[in-house]
Amino acid sequence: MTSKLIAPSILAADFANLQRDIEMVNNSDADWFHIDIMDGVFVPNISYGMPVLKAITKHAKKTIDVHLMIVDPDRYIKTFAELGSNILTVHYEACTHLHRTLQAIKDAGMKAGVALNPHTNINVLEDTIADIDLVCLMSVNPGFGGQSFIENTYHKVTQLKTLINLKNTTTLIEIDGGVTNKNAEQLVSAGADVLVAGSYVFKNDNQIETIKELRKIANN
Ligand code: DX5
Ligand code: ZN
């Protein structure tokens, strides 16, 4: 079986010590960098944009997983490819022509991800799942780090896993929001492949150890 992956969310890092926090992730058991881009329109918060991503990719030595919480993401697909994104995830709720957007992401040389808000049913992906490399299930309402995990997510992971098996695709299931050592095991047993963790990692005194433990739980 392939390893379950841990993706620390840089949103919870110390932006005044960003290089230090990036090096910490480089030197840890983490697999990916999770980068949250918010536009203040799709979500009620603004995070950081292109110059900060450029600074991150300069130092980051692991897969760059970019989560776009923006309206009309098609405008910036090429830009995010040029900035070094390996995976580009758009929100289902922000895409009128999702199939076209997914093709454009792949044409730009990246893996294509789709994120679903907590209220969005899995069945909206029935006709696109074969074109999706990663589904990001939001386990909080997007916009902020440090929120509590929504329990209904377990049920959604199971439903999504069933769809993936039915369509026989290799789509990864990523969980984003409120992930801790308390829910990691149950998420992975339901079918999750990638766990994003922001506050749980960065607000901890021993971040390297926290990542190591979380990865161990996910792969037990
Ligand atoms: C929320 C973001 C998440 C967030 C996770 O809108 O998409 O990636 O950074 O942070 P925690 O792990 O603190 O919930
Ligand atoms: Zn995210």
Image (cartoon, rainbow, N blue to C red):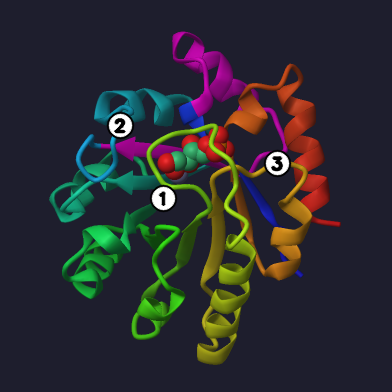
| Residue 83 horizontal/vertical position (percent) | 30, 38
How far from the left and from the top, in percent, is residue 150? 57, 52
Please state which amino acid type lies under the numbered disc 3: Thr
Pointer 2 residue: 45
Three-letter amino acid code of the residue under disc 1: Asn
Tell me the element at label 1: loop
Q: Which residue sits at x=64%, y=64%?
A: 154
* Residue 101 appears in the picture as rendered: yes
**Picture quadrant where residue 191 is located:** bottom right
Marks 1 and 2, the one that precedes in the sequence: 2
Look at the picture and state if 209 lies above or below 64. above
Mark 3 → mark 1, Cα distance in angstroms: 25 Å
Q: Which residues are magenta?
A: 12-38
Q: Nearer the viewer, residue 202 or 112?
A: 202
Q: Residue at x 24, y 70 (%)?
A: 98
Disc 3 and disc 1 in contact, CB within 8 angstroms? no
Where is residue 133? Give x, y as percent.
Answer: 45, 68
* Type of amino acid under label 2: Asn
Image quadrant in which the C terminus is located: bottom right
Point out residue 87 in the picture as x, y percentages from the top left corner: 41, 53
For marks 1 and 2, give the CA distance.
24 Å
Q: Residue at x 53, y 52 (%)?
A: 139
For residue 207, the mark is none
Label 2: which secondary element: loop
Q: Does the residue tagged 2 have its C-beta within 8 Å of any atom of ligand 1?
A: yes
Residue at the spot of label 1: 86
Q: Disc 3 marks which residue?
A: 180
Q: Left or right? Give the position of 128 relative to 212.
A: left
Distance in Å between CA atoms under marks 3 and 2: 23 Å
Left or right of residue 173, residue 16 in this image: left
N-terminal of the pair, mark 3 or mark 2, is 2
Q: Is residue 32 magenta?
A: yes
